[in-house]
Image (cartoon, coloured by chain):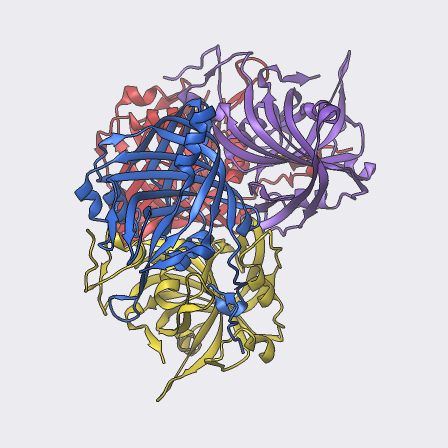
Chain colours: A purple, B red, C yellow, D blue
Amino acid sequence: MFRLRDDTTYMMPAHFGGDPYTTTYKAQQKATMLAVTFETDRAALEAYIPEELELLAPKVKVALHQLTEINWLAGAHYNLVAVTTPVRFTETKAHIDAAYPLVIWENRTAPILTGREQTGVPKIFADIEDLHVFFPHYATSLSYEGNTFLRMTFEAGDPVTGKDLEQAKRDLRSLDLIGWRYIPKVGSPGADLSQFIHFPQWMEVEKACYGTGTIQWTELSVMQNPRQHHIIKALAALPVKNVAHSVLAEGDVFLDAPHARILA
Amino acid sequence: MFRLRDDTTYMMPAHFGGDPYTTTYKAQQKATMLAVTFETDRAALEAYIPEELELLAPKVKVALHQLTEINWLAGAHYNLVAVTTPVRFTETKAHIDAAYPLVIWENRTAPILTGREQTGVPKIFADIEDLHVFFPHYATSLSYEGNTFLRMTFEAGDPVTGKDLEQAKRDLRSLDLIGWRYIPKVGSPGADLSQFIHFPQWMEVEKACYGTGTIQWTELSVMQNPRQHHIIKALAALPVKNVAHSVLAEGDVFLDAPHARILA
Amino acid sequence: MFRLRDDTTYMMPAHFGGDPYTTTYKAQQKATMLAVTFETDRAALEAYIPEELELLAPKVKVALHQLTEINWLAGAHYNLVAVTTPVRFTETKAHIDAAYPLVIWENRTAPILTGREQTGVPKIFADIEDLHVFFPHYATSLSYEGNTFLRMTFEAGDPVTGKDLEQAKRDLRSLDLIGWRYIPKVGSPGADLSQFIHFPQWMEVEKACYGTGTIQWTELSVMQNPRQHHIIKALAALPVKNVAHSVLAEGDVFLDAPHARILA
Amino acid sequence: MFRLRDDTTYMMPAHFGGDPYTTTYKAQQKATMLAVTFETDRAALEAYIPEELELLAPKVKVALHQLTEINWLAGAHYNLVAVTTPVRFTETKAHIDAAYPLVIWENRTAPILTGREQTGVPKIFADIEDLHVFFPHYATSLSYEGNTFLRMTFEAGDPVTGKDLEQAKRDLRSLDLIGWRYIPKVGSPGADLSQFIHFPQWMEVEKACYGTGTIQWTELSVMQNPRQHHIIKALAALPVKNVAHSVLAEGDVFLDAPHARILA
């Protein structure tokens, strides 16, 4: 019969075996990132922030990450679009500032499962086009079963160089997240697990370019997207008060999952 | 700020709202099922059965379900291939017999998430072709990022009618599962949740047909399928001692998630 | 060296061999058809009708065909959406009435190639969702690289029975097309082939249901759909004067390619 | 009514308009190319070379091109795998040496249509994975409706630099093709067009790396790939006598379609 091993970490199905637990392994991948950030209405945004967190600024970042050469997927690739906002979690003796992911769409299931089950990152599926690049124009579309719900475009300005690039590298470095791992009870409402988890990650930027970005939401009907229509509707309804300059960057992204920890 | 409601069941991301909890809702869908069952070596199979369960027979069923008109997905469709074996879970006063899913491949992410997080069904992603039907020949292929790992074929015999159909309806009715919901700890090996869950489901068969089925595994390298290659390898290595007659059936499938319960 | 055979019909690449030419083979497949027909402005529509043809009525039919069990594809399946209008071609001694395909989107390449190269049917690619069926609601979406450009919905009324069904079978039977096979010159403008071709095809309807259909176009930018944006724009701009009742039908579709012939 | 314009080049459907004909436009795109070349048996290979051509060497090149930032697709991307062999076409006063494409698989339909109809390049559809890169290991798989038929791998050696890079740039520059445009008759065997076409194209290589490449064919049944199984079978049967060193290169690819011309 199958027995769990003490030194091993598992995902379902566990009975085919897991991976040796190690604190030194980091997920690593190449990334092209396109980020559009805007200011919104604080009260409107706080409706989606759990009470355990404090909203640090009424800002929303929508960031495409086109990931390749992913080490934990043996060189495979996938795309994600993360919608995040800056928050603080206050522990007994200290506090942690990080990005709170309102939602992350990804076009592969494997990282959706690890993200949700290991660290409470609310990943869900969408088709996400690789960037179309008709220089200086960049664009991608997110769709669900043939129904477009988000279009991102970017018009590149001059590349960032010298001191500005050094500054950009510092500004773009942190990708730390605070996930909310929520696993429902069986046979009744409520949760069997409800935990806030700090997940350290960062980007080592090599190239960056500022420019003009746009995001355009299209609301979908229940029949077009039965499990996500309310998320799209909520995000599309956030007022866009001010769009900062947008950024396109290339570099390496690191995820330090072994140093994720539950906040309390 | 966002507050959870007591009468609501949530999935991540919870902060956009959940569904009212009800004990009466059943998932319902049309299904075309193609099942190939074979006997294998008991010891080889038991290597993948957790100690909490008893293997009732050294039999493995590989079943394609082509699902359409799915009510909880507002009429959408998807395919799954379930690899299951009959087991018993013994509780203090009674026991439960059901199918233990070794693995279930599905070609949509949404049901993978609900299955794993709500009831511990070990669903993972694969591309699964709709059945090609060149009567009396049926076939499907499962692949991962362009790499075929399972081919199922079926040559249909005569349709089942009269008393034989009534018997087939009874034989094929139960699809009850026992899932093993396993959620890993954060920052160390071991589990934050490890539960066996009984999940009632059944098929109301309308048409059935027996015939000759085949399954053919192709092992994949780590680079072809980094997260599943060991599962395919394990299943491909199970000796096929005897293939029973295979069956193709059409009907309605019902999942009674509200009556799922944790076994103890 | 490779030599062409006289009794064989070829597609590129020809040098791997072709199929024996026969006048008796018919393409056959199961079909679920959803057709929405509307009246439009005659002059607007005639802008897309070549002079060799006469527009019989200012009507446009938009029809989804969900095709399965396709004999010439060994049991495979695909979807198409045909936009057609009724025309007449007048030959020396007679005339032919048939549907003129303004465009046909298909989600598989193989039938696009045979349709274009053998019979001048102007097929191009799109992703086309299988019908979502949340009875009595039906819907599909067409998209190109993640950008939705056409949504079709249908709300089913009562099934058609008895004499009405017999009438529907007659009304829906003919699917004859007149294609315009146009192959460009190499190294200059103009055509090396420009032929009108009559292609007999029909549907043997088994079930039918009238109801309320809708079509909704979304124009796309050049960057979203560089090769088709002008087609979508042209169709979206046709005035919709009157939508007849729409129909959902199931049955078998036959294509008599060997009896296709060039009109002159 | 619609009238063709004299200064315009058209593709089906022509009646929505074409593109102004120009002799100066070049298709341009970024490319990552992985090429594996092997020697085979001359007689075996000549079975697929039409009599109008002379086989210059019994060599077959299997080359993946991963194309991005494609100007004529407004920045879109696609992949192709070309199987070519070196040939000569002798005209009255001169001869042309170029690669003869036995077949080219592409994962987008639009370039398949232009390639076939404008210049007789025998393109057909397959799913083609973007390269998985787990340095120094590279791999891709080609599949058709879930059935893998070709796997390419590459293990990179040291980058090529200095004079060797200059030599590699010259060696890899020419991508000229001779296509055989073959359009069948309607209603009988034989061709309405059968032309050999020279199509100038080239690659401006920026980086290159030699290494060890492999190709592995998997034959498919008629039901797995009804329109291509004979092509795969023919290529898989070519003896592999000697695999030269393989190459991975990056750069820009140019296609000079306006200077394509019919050979005679």
The spot of residue C61 in percent (x, y) is: 51, 71
The spot of residue A254 in percent (x, y) is: 59, 21
The spot of residue C68 in percent (x, y) is: 37, 57
Residue B97 appears anywhere in the view: no
Query: Most extreme residue toward the left, as rendered?
Result: D43
Name the image quarter holding the N terminus of chain D.
bottom right
Q: Residue at x 57, y 50 (%)?
A: D74
Q: Is residue A261 above or below residue A66?
A: above
The front one of A167 and B6 is A167
The spot of residue A48 in percent (x, y) is: 74, 35
The front one of C127 and B9 is C127
Query: Most extreme residue toward the front, as rendered?
Result: D93
Q: Residue at x 58, y 62 (%)?
A: C230
Q: Residue at x 78, y 11 (%)?
A: A93
Name the side, left or right, on which D138 lies relative to A207.
left
Q: Is residue C221 above or below residue A21?
A: below
Q: Residue at x 48, y 20 (%)?
A: A10
Question: Which quadrant of the view contains residue A87?
Answer: top right
Residue B233 appears anywhere in the view: yes
